[in-house]
Image: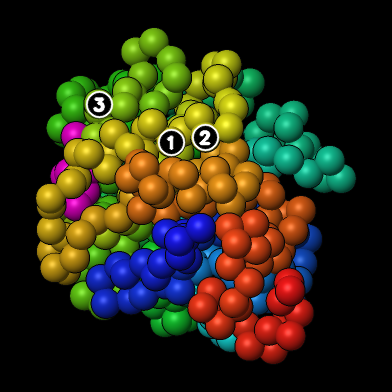
Amino acid sequence: MAHPLLLDSLTMRGLTARNRLWLPPMCMYSVTAEDGCPGNWHVLHYGTRAQGGFGTIIVEASAVTPEGRLSPNDLGLWDDSQIKGHHYLVEAIHIGGALAGVQLGHGGRKAGTPPWRPDVEGSRTGTLPGWELVAPSAVPYPEHATPQALTTAEIADTVQAFADAARRAVAAGYDVIELHGAHGYLIHEFLSPLSNIRTDAYGGSDEGRRRFVLEVARAVREAIGDDKVLDIRLSATDWAEGGITGEDTAALARQLVQAGVDVLHVSTGGNAPTKVPAGPGYQVPFAAQVKRAVAGMTTPGGGQPQVVTVGIIDSGLQAEQILVAGLADAVATGRAALRDPYLPVRWTHELGVNDWQAAHLPIQYWRGAWR
Ligand SMILES: Cc1cc2nc3c(=O)[nH]c(=O)nc-3n(C[C@H](O)[C@H](O)[C@H](O)COP(=O)(O)O)c2cc1C
């Protein structure tokens, strides 16, 4: 096979990742996270996956306010004291040769609900007792507590919280700042008519529902300066009647690029308990739709917007076919990388490349290359 596209570098603003394979954000709900601070466990977890060859690693959703966490064991960037732990994480990722990114999130009406921790009481049984929920409107997610609708002053504070967390992410050394605009959390809740029934400037129309995310994007771009990559994860569709559609997201993507976003990381769902037709590559068509929408646009930073696809992409060949078909610029693979931190090494081999130098894999491991 010719040199695989998956192993081509990916340039975003002035930063270049060694390949087009991303580790997507995955909350670990690790009891070793204290007060939002990453510990040694996180350094090992992310560092190993950087050593394993990922080009860009996005650290799990890190909350911009304490009440925006999904569980007491989420990471956070709401306080300067959390910068140091994140800095160790960034160092470990850089040593492994990957760009380091972090996802900034607020759980909105789904905060206080760890989606998966069989050993933690309260997991999957609804909102943790005493957790104060805020959202665009007082519309609960099924079986969750009813949130308080944010006032306009609180919305401004939350925009500021995203900007402050982004500034801390930069202080920690992150290259990529990813906004969590997907999976039914606060930004997505503003975007979707299923969860936003406001009648003021932050609801009522596409323009109103998009106001919050665009304000966050502009404030975060301002906070991180011109050199860092701004990325956003979006749920392209709610998979539900009356919810967001792929066309809505394609139009929004153009506005986000104008607001200073460099990368669109396209996922789906999470804002309504609907049946999702999940299968191999099932979200790729949505990424392709976004990619078509932003084609030819130039980011204010002077580069091309890049589109990342994710969702049951479990082999090097499948990833390569997506890139060759021009459906996305990069591919993220999550659960498969929980099974195997060296997945990029394996995919590289699967694509017929055993020259680990060419694949930019860690020099310390070259003697282990397949022969
Ligand atoms: C354990 C776990 C935690 C996750 N946490 C997050 C998260 O913090 N932020 C996010 O946007 N998506 C999160 N996701 C979704 C993944 O990033 C990814 O989109 C999803 O697993 C589909 O990709 P895959 O089929 O390659 O696993 C999580 C998924 C898993 C399995």
Residue carrying label 1: 284
Q: Position of residue 155 (x, y in %)?
A: 30, 46
Q: Give the CA distance from mark 3 to mark 1.
A: 14 Å
Q: Which mark is residue 363?
A: none
Q: Is residue 1 left or right of residue 10?
A: right
Q: Position of residue 33 (x, y in %)?
A: 71, 66
Q: Of circles 2 and 3, which is in front?
A: 2
Q: Which residues are magenta?
A: 251-257
Residue carrying label 2: 281
Q: Of circles 3 and 1, which is in front?
A: 1
Query: Mark 1 touching mark 2, by CB under 8 A?
Result: yes
Decide whether residue 253 is among the magenta residues.
yes
Q: Is residue 213 left or right of residue 350?
A: left
- At a point 67% along the width and 47% down the height, the residue shown is 335
Nearer the observer, 253 or 3: 3
Nearer the observer, 341 or 344: 344
First-in-chain label (2 vs 3): 3
Q: Give the CA distance from mark 1 to mark 2.
A: 5 Å
Q: Which mark is residue 247?
A: 3
Amino acid type for the residue under numbered disc 2: Gly
